[in-house]
Image (cartoon, coloured by chain):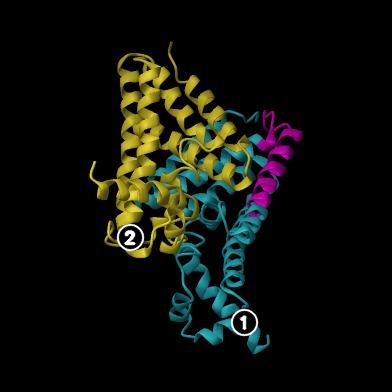
Chain colours: A yellow, B cyan
Amino acid sequence: MPKGQETRDFIITKAAPLFNEKGYSGSSIADVMLATGLKKGGIYNHFESKDELAVAAFEHNWGLLKARYAQALHTAGESPTAQLFAAIDVHVGFAEGEPVVGGCPLLNTAVESDDGHPLLRERVREAVDFWRDLLRNIVTRGIAQGEFCIADADEIATIIISTLEGGVMLSKLYHSPDHLLRAAAHLRTFLNDKLLL
Amino acid sequence: MPKGQETRDFIITKAAPLFNEKGYSGSSIADVMLATGLKKGGIYNHFESKDELAVAAFEHNWGLLKARYAQALHTAGESPTAQLFAAIDVHVGFAEGEPVVGGCPLLNTAVESDDGHPLLRERVREAVDFWRDLLRNIVTRGIAQGEFCIADADEIATIIISTLEGGVMLSKLYHSPDHLLRAAAHLRTFLNDKLLL
């Protein structure tokens, strides 16, 4: 890997948790300088603007979460039921600060960017689209294989994402895993009632 | 009302939607100057710092939401069941940008302040405490009056708040009321199953 690419990746790795915790507007280039030990010019050698760094930092955080999903679905095996519960469990990791420091980057970035930051909003929409597709596909397979009695897979994706993200918000606010754990338990009960097996 | 108090209130009224949409870090004093037509000195005559204005702006937004709750519960009458559904309907107003421009100030401020801004986090915690108490009290009365079959009122408050706030996040992100409407419909079905009447 060329040295320039290494430095770029190093900056992203340091900026990503910072931006997730303090927000894009709340993080300054001075903060990135402090986190990386680089001078301003050393950062802007690799990124045209703070916006470009912000998008790269978001992609990094989202990549960590997406990798966790892939791993969980792989471990869960072929059953749509097992996969659906495994996908929920990934998000419950945020109760313990996993896999990304500072809570869910989708929630954080959506809330910050929805009334501005069109570039970031576009990226977070694509990420949430991916998550919705992932859940919808699992549910659709579960319906086709006779595992679930569910009328609308997209509606279920909305309910799962809403409940988990609101739970992350409360758990972060109160510095307590309880709210997210309750939200996830509620979802499991709700989904168990839809199982046909 | 003295002129100074009028000007202070005017600044808060203009800063409140701005801060709710763009966030506290994302809004500058220059933005507040533009929104109010006042010079920087004219703003800092009334507020010691941007933080003090931010807290006042949050309180203003939260006050609008709280007033809507009070009105809805009053209109719903004495029945805990009617009150609980009315409380949910208040939040569904965010699907249409009501009662506060820029989405739920609790969600926005919680997500922005949970890893910093201790003063704001403290205020948003108090506001969410108020909302949780309101829901818990309705549920507790509903249990006592034999209207609900619910084991844990606090758990129900967590589920309602999580589902609604996650729904607000998705509806804001996609600029579509559908997600919040689905989240609320899910909650109504869930709660209907707990009704004994």
Subunit ID for the residue under disc 1: B
Q: Nearer the viewer, residue A10 or A62?
A: A10
Horizontal side of B13 relative to B168 (left or right) equals: right
In three-dimensional space, the C-alpha distance between marks 2 and 1, rounded to whole angstroms, equals: 41 Å
Q: Is the C terminus of chain A in the top left, top right, bottom left or bottom right quadrant?
A: top left
Q: Position of residue A139 (x, y in %)?
A: 35, 24
Q: Position of residue B2 (x, y in %)?
A: 68, 88
Q: Position of residue B50 (x, y in %)?
A: 56, 72
Horizontal side of B70 relative to A119 (left or right) equals: right
- Identify residue for label 1: B46
Marks 2/1 in contact by CB < 8 Å: the verdict is: no
Q: Callout 2, which amino acid?
A: Gly
Query: Farthest residue in the front direction?
Result: A3
- Identify residue for label 2: A42
The residue tagged with tag 1: helix, strand or loop? loop
The residue tagged with tag 2: helix, strand or loop? helix
Q: Callout 1, which amino acid?
A: His
Q: Are marks 2 and 1 on the same chain?
A: no
Q: Classify residue B75 by image quadrant.
A: bottom right
Magenta segment? B127-154
* Residue A30 vertical placement versus B152 (above, below): below
